[in-house]
Amino acid sequence: MKPLKVIIIGTGRLACACLESCLLHTENVECVEPENAAFSTLRSLCAKRGVKYYCLLERDALKTFFLGCASPTLVVSAYNSFIFPKPVLASPWLTIVNFHNSLLPRHRGRNAPTWTIFEMDDVTGITWHRVTQEIDQGEIICQRDLKVPSDVTAINLTQQTLDLGAEAFREILASLLDGTHKAVPGDRRGEETLHRSSDVPNAGILDLSWSLPKVYAFLRSLDYGKAKVFAPPRVHLLGKQFVVLGYHHKLEEAIHPAGNVIEVRKDQLILCDGGHCLKIQFRQN
């Protein structure tokens, strides 16, 4: 089905990039933002480019909006938190494609960069896929690989995947608009773990029995900079619980020549494995 209109639902840099790409092909584009940001880059871009913009926060309002589409429409889910209900998915007028920031089926669900880093994957990537009732299990339209840097944080990896997703979208957009895009079933033999927004690596607790690289991965996996995606990690030490305030973003040369060492200072925890050390700032909870 060749779409006559495009609706972009999402937020932030990816939604904006998808909008700019779509406007190179058609003027019949609308944008929906399912969250209320203090400063919305998507709303500002829509105002600048003369594009209809809707901020719809309620699930019922979003459902009604999409069920109101009565002509062939391409729906681009670009960093979007709204889960399309069954009646919307059943609409004969809608072709819905979604961006996901991992190589599906690995790390389905929310906060995929967190799990990529925590599980110390060497490679991640992005997926554009059709939307079905099963989360992140629709047929795959395209995937792109991305090597995971050894010191990348969750916020940095998120940004890298968003940029890669925007690049891939530009490549597949023409086929989406003329109805010739192809999609293939995902490899269901791979990992089927579904991460929910409430899921946190190791319940947010730093385990001092981990190897130093694992500790470093754990801290980076929860590091979204100023965005409060997760509560600060905690660590149990000397019979007390402490909150991690920060950490050194590079592994340093070990200050102890060999063996695993834990050194506790007034407000700093130093972990060494004989080759490298990691400095962690903390306070008592």
Image (cartoon, helix red, strand yellow):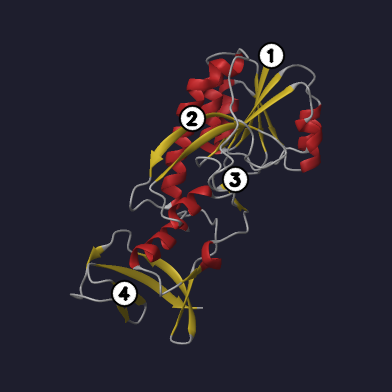
- Residue 246, position as x, y percentages in the image: 40, 65
In primary-sequence order, the first of circles 4 and 1 is 1
Give the CA distance from mark 1 to mark 3: 32 Å
Give the number of the disc on residue 87.
none
Q: Foreground mark, 1 or 3?
A: 1
Mark 1 crowd level (few <14, some 14–19, many ≥20, 10 Å Cα): some
Give the number of the disc on residue 270.
4
- State the residue position of label 3: 38
* As drawn, 158 above or below 4: below
Question: What's the residue at 54%, 27% (across, down)?
Answer: 18
Amino acid type of the residue that numbered disc 1 sits on in the rendered structure: Leu
Q: Foreground mark, 3 or 2?
A: 2
Give the CA distance from mark 1 to mark 2: 22 Å
Question: What's the residue at 43%, 86% (across, down)?
Answer: 238
- Residue 192, position as x, y percentages in the image: 59, 48
Q: Quadrant of residue 231?
A: bottom right
Mark 4: secondary structure: strand
- State the residue position of label 2: 166
Question: What's the residue at 41%, 55% (across, down)?
Answer: 120
Task: Say whether residue 43 is visible.
Answer: no
Amino acid type of the residue that numbered disc 3 sits on in the rendered structure: Ala
Give the number of the disc on residue 4.
1
Q: Is residue 30 left or right of residue 44?
A: right
**Mark 1 touches mark 3? (CB < 8 Å):** no
Mark 3 crowd level (few <14, some 14–19, many ≥20, 10 Å Cα): few
Q: Is residue 59 left or right of residue 43?
A: right
**Mark 4 touches mark 1? (CB < 8 Å):** no
Residue lying farthest to the front in this orientation: 189
Mark 2: secondary structure: helix
In primary-sequence order, the first of circles 4 and 3 is 3
Quadrant of the rendering where the N terminus is positioned:
top right
In primary-sequence order, the first of circles 1 and 2 is 1
